[in-house]
Every structure is written in C-alpha cells, then in structure tokens.
Amino acid sequence: MKKSLSYGFKAIRLVWEANGIYSLVMIFGKIYESTLYPFIQVFLLAQILDLIPNIKTLESSSFIWIILTYLIASFIKLALRSYLDMREAYFQTELEGFIDLRISKKLTELDPATFEDPEFQNLLSQLEGVKGTLQMHVIRSIALIDAVFKFITATIVVSTSFPLFAPIIIITTIPFYLAVDKARIVTWPYFVEKRSIVTRVTQYIKTLLSSDSTSKESIIYKTGSTLLGKIRDEQKKYYKEFNDVVNPWPFRIFLGRMVQFLAFIYTQYFNFARIMEGSLSVGQFALLFQQSQNLVFSAEEILSQYSSMSARNKYLDKFFEFLERKREILNPVSPIKLPLTTIPQVIEFKSVSFKYPRSERYILKDFNLTIKSGERIALVGENGAGKTTIIKLLLRFYDVTEGEILINGINIKELDLSEWHKYIGALFQDFIKYQFKFKDNIYLGDLSKTENEKLLRDAISKSGADKYLDTLPNGIEQIVGKMFEGGIDLSGGQWQKLALARAFFRDAPILILDEPTSAIDAKAEYEIFQNIQKLENDKTVIIISHRFSTVRHADRILVLDDGKIIEQGTHEELISQKGLYEELFEIQAKGYK
C-alpha cells in the first residue's frame, strides 16, 4: 500500500510539474463534476420533496435559495466542463511531452558505459510502455482522490441516520476487490511484458517493409506475405494465451458484485422501513438512497483504483529506477584541472588491464603505451584486438580494471571528465547523422565557436566536404537527411566527410579518428590525410583503421593482437620486420593487383 500511494503522489507531482496550477483545476473539476455537483443536485431535490406537502402555504421566497444554489452550481459545472473539454487533451499532450523530456534529459546525464549495459538497454526498451502506464497511473490517482472524497461525503450523510451502513458496504465490497485484484495480477503481464514480444516483432517487420535500406529487397524477393505471416503467428499465440487467462474471471467478478449488491438491497430495506414508519421524509429518503449508492460505488472505486495502481507498481518501478540511475563513471569530489593550453598532453597507459563489466575475459592485460605530445599514432590489428577499447579507456567511458592512465602525469580518474573531453575531438565509426542543417552538423562539434566563420570553412575544407557543398541548393543552410521537409540525403561518404568536419571544427589538441575514411573513395581519402599531415605539431592524432593506405603515414604504427602491442614502428620499419603487419598489408595489397 505504501508503494502504491507513494507512486500516486509522485505521479500527481509529475502532473504539477508538467501542467502547473492547471493540474489543480483538473483534479477539482473531476471531484466537482462526479461528486460535489451530483450531491448538490440530490440535496436540493430532497429539500424540494420535503417542501411539496406544504406547497400551498409556502411563499416563493422558500424556493429562491434552492434555485440560486442550483444555478450557481450548474454555472460552475458548465464553466469547468467547457474549460476541461478543450484543455484536457492539451494537458495530456503536455504531460506526454514532459515525460519524454524527463527521459531525454536523463539520457544526457548518463555515460557510454551505462548505454552498453544490456540490462540498461532492456530497461530502456520498456520505457515507452511504462510511459503509458505512468499516464494511466496519473488518471487512476486522480480518480482515487475523487472516490475517497465521494466516500467520505456519502459516509457523513448516511451515518447521521444509519451508522452501520458504511461498515456493511465496506465489508461486502471486499470479495469484489479480491476478485478484481487477482484478475489484474494474472492478466496485467499480457498488457505489457507478453505484449512487448508481439509489438517488437510487428515494429521490426514494419521497419523491414518501409525502410529505404530494406524495402527494396522485400519487393524483389516478394517476402511481404511471409513477413506478415510471422506477425499473425505471434498475434495468434498471444491472443490465445490471453484469452485462456481472462476466461474464468468475469463470472468470479460477477459473484463479488452480487455480494455487494445484496448488501445494498439489505441496507435500503431499513431505509424504506423508516419512510413507511413516517420517521423519514421523502426528501431524506431520496438523499439517503442516492448517498447509499455513492457509498457502494465509491467503496468499489477506491478498491478498484487501488488494485489497478498496485498492479502497475512493478512497471512504474522501471520508470523511477531509470530516473534514479547513476552514471557508471563518476567525477572525483575534488577534480584536478588541466592548465588551459593548445599543446597536446602526454598520454600514458601504465600496466593497464581491463575487462568489460560482467565479463571474465581481459581485453587488455598489463598494457603499456606512451603517446608523446603532437605524435600521430595509428592502431591496427584484427577485430577484437583491443583498438576501440583503448579509445574508450582514454575517453574514460570505462575505468581500468588494473593499472592507471596518466595525462601529463595525472591519473585520469582525478580529472574533471567534462573538462577532459574538451581537449578531444573525435570521429567514431558509428558517427551521428544529424538530420539538421549542414552547418549545424559541424557546429555541434563545439557550440561555443558558432561565430567563428573561418574555423567553419577550414573544417569543411580539411574534411573534403567542400567538394559537394556547392551541389546543395542552400549551401551550409541546407537541411541534410530525409527526416524533415526540404531535406536532401547524402551518400555514406558525404555523411562521413561531414562528421569529420565536425571533429576538425572542435579544433581540440587531441584528434581521435576511428575508421575515418571507411566510406570514402581512395582519392578523397588521400586528400584528407594530406590535410591531417599538414596539421601543426600542436595536435596529437590517434587513428584506428583496417585500411593500410590510411595509417601508413603515421609517425608510429602500433600492431595489436589479443590486447598486446606485438609490433610498432613506421610503415617502412614494420614492412621490413616481416611480421603480422607485413602479412596483413600484403593480403590487402593483393586486392589491388
């Protein structure tokens, strides 16, 4: 119970944060329309019924207060209903947007180590469904407040004449509550967890049928009917299981309601007996009858809403667990600040060993490497050799398992992480294709430099993106990608050049390039690396690539195998050693002969 009420309070607080004062209007409107206004109506009706026997001797003034009260109450109801009719959908949309914003804001606070955690990805995949659950929890919480208000009002009115009515109604509502609660527990997984399988299959196949990159194959191979069959199979299995679970419960819930109904009839027997004895007026009878009904309905509603909220608790756990999730990598309490300089730092991996979380396999073991200031380093090796892991550790996406990484002699764990990242520009293999303006794609490399027109032009030129910029109708103002109206899609190589321009625009002392030319033709690749070679010695460049034409001009090439440096030197030195580098180079060179 404590958790359900706590989550209800949190849900109401979310509504307050999203809708402000209007959330109170929404709650009051619900209570007024379903509880206060009907009570005022039946109360005034009771007064009229009691006045009717003496109507011939009454003055018109006896009815004035009744008429005025009714008109005022009706005016308030009409005003609230008119306002909420037009605003409820807006409030709902605003709440959805607020929840989306909270989720997105939390994502900006987390780190790559968190995103690479499979358990977190599983949690993240459920948030869309949890969002709907949270919205429904808000509705249920407001309905619970209304039901409690209605129950208290009805109890006060009824107890003045029949003190035992409320306890009788509450006790006889319990069988109904138990049946509904159990039914919700056994059926609820079919609304979320079990349904997610069908949803994922459906979404995946819809993507296959509609995506630019996959729909062509579907048309050529005529796979549409087969793929639709997979959706039907999953739906058939899901609906059969769901139906089997639902079948027994309607009758059990009916029996619970019958117990409640018989108790209501029993209480109204005493109500009717009083009017027959003459100890209860017709108006009082009407008021007590209506409030006895409210007692039944509100008792049922309280338990039903509470049951529904309890069933949702384990799914709301996921939402609040997400909001309370902490970064895997934390800043030190008193970080050391690196001096502001354009000179690249000396980087040292000192006896570093590393294995990924929940893995016993070491990717790096007793790894040592020193990168001098301004040095151009290339990392080569087969997949799984540890190249990308070295970059992740240098960026402190993960902390080392053993050993230490030193930046100008300072342990990287003692540096402010956001400050350290300012010294690094990077192009990752899985770079982002921002579906915004051409220039915005580059500005996102460093938003503090958006007024630097020269730096923008230099970045475009160095990346080779200037070679196709003139073909865009609106130049640097052109929206790229097809997501938004007026956008023009780019080829894979053009996107990569644009991402490379973003890295150049950052103009950081350390430049990391992970497969920077994998989608670029040989001529463009040559021009780009000519530009990299022209960079002053105030830039440290670290390149990861499988293409030897990309790495051959590096100051030092490191050949990795099973997390160890097995060879290092210039291209010429490594070729002369007749080792793994020479073997891989010859294999690749044969493809060009």
Image (tube, rainbow, N blue to C red):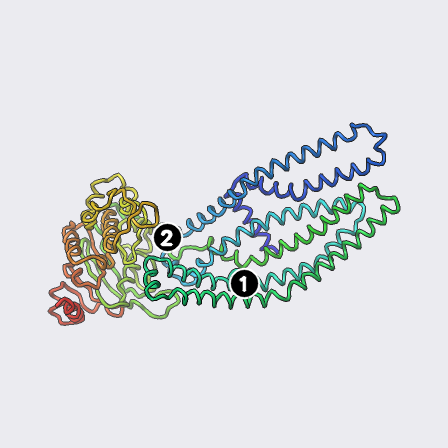
* Left or right side of 127 for 401: left
* Left or right side of 96 for 577: left
Q: Are marks 2 and 1 in contact (CB under 8 Å)?
A: no
- x, y percent for residue 25: 58, 39
Q: Amino acid at mark 1?
A: Tyr
Lower position in the chain sequence, tag 2 or tag 1: 1
State the residue lying farthest toward the right: 277
Q: Amino acid at mark 2?
A: Asn
- x, y percent for residue 496: 25, 54
- How far apart in space, not on screen, are marks 2 and 1 (Cα)? 42 Å
Using the rendered view, name the quadrant where residue 325 is placed. Answer: bottom left
- x, y percent for residue 220: 32, 64
- Residue for badge 2: 331
Q: How many marks?
A: 2
Q: Viewer-proximal residue, 49 or 504?
A: 49
Disc 2, SS: loop
- x, y percent for residue 394: 28, 57
The dot on residue 190 is 1
Can see residue 220?
yes
Q: Quadrant of the C terminus?
A: bottom left
- Judge the density around disc 2: few (<14), some (14-19), many (≥20) Cα neighbours within 10 Å: few
